[in-house]
Image (cartoon, grey):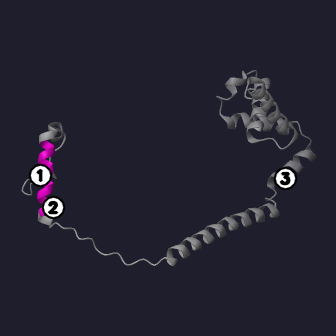
Amino acid sequence: MVNTTGPMDHIRNIKLIALKDAMLEPSHDAQWRHCARWYSKTFSTPLHMVDDLPRLDVLQAYFEEHYEAMEEVELHKELEELLRPQDALQKSLEKSKEESDLDKMVREAAEANKASKAKPRAPAKPKDIGKSIDEAVADLGKALTHLQKEAPEIGKAFNLDFGLDDSSNL
């Protein structure tokens, strides 16, 4: 069997991603790498050091340079594009998707409720505890005494004496 995860396949995959970003809408990472390369070339900064700079400073320098090179007509078009509200169709698609997700959740909850109602259960009966409170307190005291004998270091960490007349435990 041929190893398909060698270095050449990694390079091929990177080339495919770079080609996709160049031919289609570039990803946010691709846009950042473009700005970082521009900054590196423009300000003679090693590329690996650009990532250490505040991204807002790099992006502001990039867009300022980009807009300074534009004609006034292009600047006005860019301004209109930036100030234009989000496309109504896009908003309605997002809203319908949100509603469909909500509808799905409501439907699943209703189905779960039907399933739980379909099998009626007898009301829960209180369990017979079998011990009185006095017996439980006595057992707790025995357990604490045993713990102090078996692990004396615990007694040093905190006081296991729960005497009612001693207010220093509060």
Along the line of sight, the residue nearer the viewer: 2 or 43? 2
Question: Which percent across, then down, holds residue 140?
Answer: 15, 55
Report how far apart the C-alphas of labels 2 and 3 lie in the structure: 75 Å
> Residue under circle 1?
142
Q: Is residue 117 left or right of residue 136?
A: right
- Tell me, yes or no, whether the two marked residues, 3 and 1, touch with CB atoms within 8 Å: no
Helix, strand or loop at mark 1? helix
Residue 136's mark?
Answer: 2
Query: Mark 1 or mark 3, which is nearer the start of the sequence?
Result: 3
Give me the residue at 73% from left, 26% from top: 3
Helix, strand or loop at mark 2? helix
Q: Which residue is at the far front?
A: 1
Q: Residues within 10 Å of mark 2 (few under 14, many from 20)?
A: few
- Tell me, yes or no, whether the two marked residues, 1 and 2, touch with CB atoms within 8 Å: no
- Nearest to the eye among marks 3 and 1: give it: 1
Q: In the rendered structure, which amino acid carries the disc numbered 1?
A: Lys
- Tell me, yes or no, whether the two marked residues, 2 and 3, touch with CB atoms within 8 Å: no
Q: Residues within 10 Å of mark 3 (few under 14, many from 20)?
A: few
Magenta run includes residue 5: no
Height in image: 87 above or below 11?
Answer: below
**Range covered by the magenta-colored residues:** 135-148
Query: Mark 3 or mark 2, which is nearer the start of the sequence?
Result: 3
Q: In the rendered structure, which amino acid carries the disc numbered 2?
A: Ala
> Residue under circle 3?
81
Name the image quarter holding residue 111. Answer: bottom right
- Nearest to the eye among marks 2 and 3: give it: 2
Query: Mark 2 or mark 1, which is nearer the start of the sequence?
Result: 2
Along the line of sight, the residue nearer the viewer: 73 or 88? 88
Question: Which percent across, then down, holds residue 107?
Answer: 63, 71
Magenta run includes residue 141: yes
